[in-house]
Image: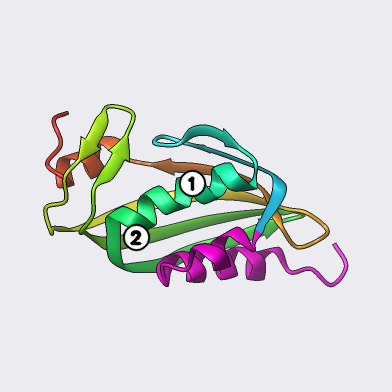
Amino acid sequence: MPNINPEEVVRNLLAAYARNDIEGVVATLDPSYVVHGPFAGKAEGREAGRKTYETILNAFTGQEIKILNMMTKGDTVVTEYMWTATFTGPLQTSQGTLPPNGRRIEYAAAEFFRVNSKGLITEERAYYDSYGILKQLSAKT
């Protein structure tokens, strides 16, 4: 990928996410973007990506993302990070809406990102402990 640094693209996404900057997040996504994850399931398209990220950004404030490891091979970036935020807004889930409780939560995540030759993310695969997150949110598990 000439002149494209996939790690920089992913760092830009994570920085926008931590700033609660939905337009910054969406700017990193290709129109063909696909996300796979425990909460999102599979969502396809840039607007589906927007909706997935907005759901989180509307429910949490004060986000901090600490990158623990980042590796790149070709167009794929693997990132391990710690995510911390405060649950301040309603969280829409497939099981209904969780009311905010003001708690600070933290979890570890690993994600695989695929970055195309235009410097946009085409695919994201997220792995994290959704049960542990729900416990922190005081949801029934």
Q: Is residue 6 magenta?
A: yes
Q: Position of residue 73 (x, y in %)?
A: 72, 55
Q: Disc 2 marks which residue?
A: 83
Left or right for 79, reference 139: right
Identify the image quadrant of residue 102.
Answer: bottom left
Q: Is label 2 in a helix, a strand or a loop?
A: strand
Nearer to us: label 2 or label 1: 1
Q: Residue at x 25, y 44 (%)?
A: 133
* Label of residue 51 in the image: 1
Q: Which residues are magenta?
A: 1-28
Taking depth in this image into account, of 72 and 120 the one nearest to the observer is 120
* Left or right, residue 95 beside residue 114: left
Q: Residue at x 71, y 52 (%)?
A: 30
Identify the residue at image location x=12%, y=41%: 138
Give the mark nearer the N terminus: 2 vs 1.
1
Label 1 element class:
helix
Is 4 magenta? The answer is yes
- Look at the magenta stretch and give its main secondary structure: helix
Quadrant location of residue 135?
Answer: top left
| Residue 16 point in image, percent of width and height | 50, 69
Numbered label attached to residue 67: none
